[in-house]
Amino acid sequence: MAKFVVTPANEAQRDAWLDRTVPAVERVRPGLWSIPVPIPINPLRYVLVYALELPDGVAIIDAGWNTDEAYDGLVAGLRVAGYEITDVKGVLVTHIHPDHYGLAGRIREVSGAWIALHPKDAALVHERYDDSAIDRLVEKERGLLVRAGVPALTLDELAGASMMIRHMVSMAKPDRLVEDGDRLDLPGWDLRAVWTPGHSPGHLCFVSESRRLLFSGDHVLAKITPIVAVHPQSGPNPLADYLDSLAAVRKFDVEEVLPAHEYRFLELAERVDYVMAHHDERLAEVEQAAQGLSCWDIATRLTWSRPWETIPPFMRRSANGETLAHLVWLEAKGRVRREAGEPDLWFATEG
Ligand SMILES: [Zn+2]
Ligand SMILES: [Zn+2]
């Protein structure tokens, strides 16, 4: 597949990503700031929080992890823009993942800001982050992993793989639910929510048609593609959702894409086409490998960015979930069939 490389909106920001440093706080447009907020133990290194100036403060898109380092980074970044954390009036959260949502509750505590989330992700808050519900979630995860054919020895390690990061999220219920097409009530901004499920069931992008900007969260990024996986909190066919959601944003005539990681870039439609082609290729690879094997065995045979043996448990679980997302998509199209069992076995229907 021919590589398509996006044009960075700001080369210094792109270079910071490539040099593994943190980019500067930046005034992107009049009234709009980009603030990198550090995230721990994660190759993504920072989340880009966008601060939108309002007559009486700022609204921010995404928040960062619930760590002191992230909080201090956000406070310092807002100061560069001329604001205090207490000036934050609203937190628009693109999705429930800890690097976006984790700090929202703490910000609300100090500033009184409202927190907005899509109802589909709001519905997951309790199960994901409340201690009373977590055993059930781990049990569901275990059931999925057994049917995927994860070897018994690896099972415990994988089923609890995300427990270590749970404390970095404060379990904040949202104050506002934002649905597809909703206009956000932010004076001076014509911001509209676009529901883009796939990476998360309630993922939201925000588009400003007058400023021709798309805040893309984790949905469309400059270099990496977001994880789209089957897991206890995913939709039944998350890859179908994701590909539909790519089509839903492709049509926007924007001049710049403002993602939550890496760096801003210019070509939305071309990047979307490239990501779609990447999944087509991946689907063909998964289909070819489906020769009466479990999902896990198929996953071990695919090409990953590094050898399977060197992938840590948390990422192997994602790899398994991503493989399953591709299998489920192919099953819905009739290109593979599943022989149900423990594990399920997968067969390509042609060739
Ligand atoms: Zn995410
Ligand atoms: Zn993210």
Image: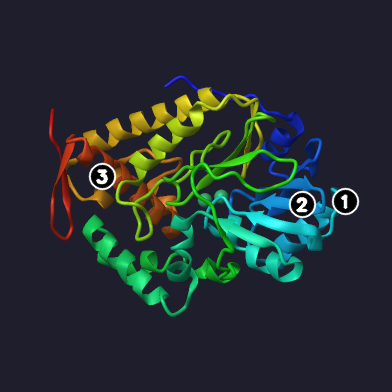
Residue behind mark 3 = 328
Which secondary structure, mark 2? strand
Q: Earlier in the sequence, mark 1 or mark 2?
A: 2
Q: Residue at x 27, y 61 (%)?
A: 144
- Identify residue type, mark 2: Val
Tell me how far mark 1 sits from mark 2, CA to CA.
10 Å
Which residue of the protein is positioned furthest toward the bottom in this rendering? Answer: 132
Q: Please identify, in this view, whether the residue under mark 1 or under mark 3 is nearer the observer.
A: 1
Which residue of the protein is positioned furthest toward the top in this rendering? Answer: 2
Residue 351 in the image: state x and y as whole percent: 13, 28
Tell me how far mark 1 sits from mark 3, CA to CA.
49 Å
Which image quarter holds the N terminus? top left
- Disc 3 crowd rating (10 Å Cα; few below 14, some 14-19, many 20+) is many
Residue behind mark 1 = 82
Q: From the viewer's perspective, tell me whether residue 350 is left or right of residue 39.
A: left
Q: Please identify, in this view, whether the residue under mark 1 or under mark 2 is nearer the observer.
A: 2
Q: Residue 58 shows which numbered tag?
A: 2
> 316 or 64: nearer the eye?
64
Res 261 quadrant in image: top right
Relative to 93, say whether 244 is above or below.
above
Which secondary structure, mark 3? helix
Q: Please identify, in this view, whether the residue under mark 2 or under mark 3 is nearer the observer.
A: 2
Residue 70 in the image: state x and y as whole percent: 71, 60
- Residue 242 makes an appearance in the image: yes
Relative to 55, say whether 151 is above or below.
below
Res 254 quadrant in image: top right
Tell me how far mark 2 sits from mark 3, CA to CA.
42 Å
Q: Earlier in the sequence, mark 2 or mark 3?
A: 2
Residue 105 in the image: state x and y as whole percent: 64, 67
